[in-house]
Amino acid sequence: MSERRRACLETFHNSECRAHLVTAETLDSFEVLENPFHPAFQFLSPIHQSDYLRAYFMHYFGGGYADIKAISHSWIPAFAAVEKGNALGAGYAEVVGGVARIHETKPLGNYYFLDRSVSALEITLRYRHLKLRRGVLIGNGAFIFRPGTEFTKRWLSIVEKRLDLLLPHLKANPARYPKEVPGVDYGDGPSRYPVPWSFLLGDVLAPLTLQYHPRILQVVPAPDFDNYE
C-alpha cells in the first residue's frame, strides 16, 4: 500500500464505525462455508476480485463498504437513515461522468444488460436512460446495504452468472496484472484477459439501483476522489 493510500486508511476513524481491512491474509475469514467464493475468483485481477467481493459481502454480511479513499465525515447518520427509513441501502449521488458505459462493454462478442444478452440497439438505449436518470443513481466507491435482501440476492446472482460465462476464458487467460484491461499491451502482446473493466460492478450496480432507487438513499458521505493513489 502506498503512503498516500495508508494515509487515506488512517482517516477511516472519521466514519465513527468499526472498519475491517480485507487483505489476502484475512479474506478466508469472510468466506461463507455454505456459499464459497465463485470458482472464477482466483483467476480475476485484484480490481475485479474487489468488484465481486462487494456484491458477496453486501449480500451475506451487509453493512458498509468504502474504497481506500479519505473519509472526512461520520457514517453514523447514514446508517441511522437506512434503519429509520427501512431502506434497502444507501450511497452517495453518482458523480458527473461516473455512469458505467454499458454500451461499450462487449465481452465474448455480446452485450449484456443485467442477467441477459441484448442487442446493440437495446444496450445503447439503456445507457442513454441511465445517463438521463443519473440523479437517482449511487456511486461504486462507498455504500451501505442490508444483507439478504432481494436487491443483494439479484446483485450477487447477476455477477456470478457473468462469471459463469467468463470462467472457461479466465482459466485460459487469468489476470497477470493488478489493473489488467483486455487488449492492452503490457509488453508481451495484447492482453487476452476476458473481463471488461466495469463488467462486474458498475455495469450491474447502476441499472440495478435504478430499478430499486425509491428504496436506496443518497446519504453516505462521498469519498475524496483526489490524491488517493
Image (spheres, rainbow, N blue to C red):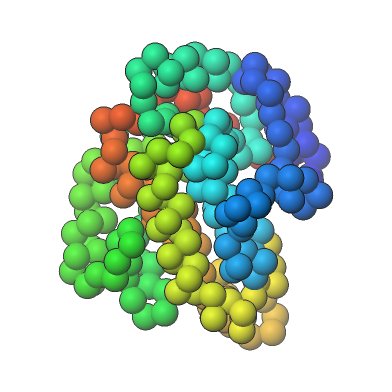
In the image: residue 202, left or right of residue 214: right
Q: Position of residue 58 (x, y in %)?
A: 52, 40
Residue 126 can be seen, yes or no:
yes
Q: Nearer the viewer, residue 114 or 187?
A: 114
Residue occupying the point 22% across, 44% down: 132
Location of residue 114 by image quarter? bottom left
Do we see residue 49 in this rendering?
A: no
Q: Is residue 225 left or right of residue 205?
A: right
The location of residue 64, given as percent across then percent down, is 55, 31
Residue found at x 33% / y 47%: 208
Q: Is residue 22 above or below residue 191?
A: above
Task: Tell me which corner region of the image, top left, top right, bottom left or bottom right, holds residue 213.
Answer: top left
Figure check: 26 above or below 101: above
Q: Is residue 12 above or below residue 127?
A: above
Q: Position of residue 116 (x, y in %)?
A: 29, 66
Looking at the picture, tell me which residue is in the foreground, 190 or 195.
Answer: 195
Q: Is residue 129 left or right of residue 107?
A: left
- Please report the residue visible at 59 percent of the width from the left and 68 percent of the height from the top: 40
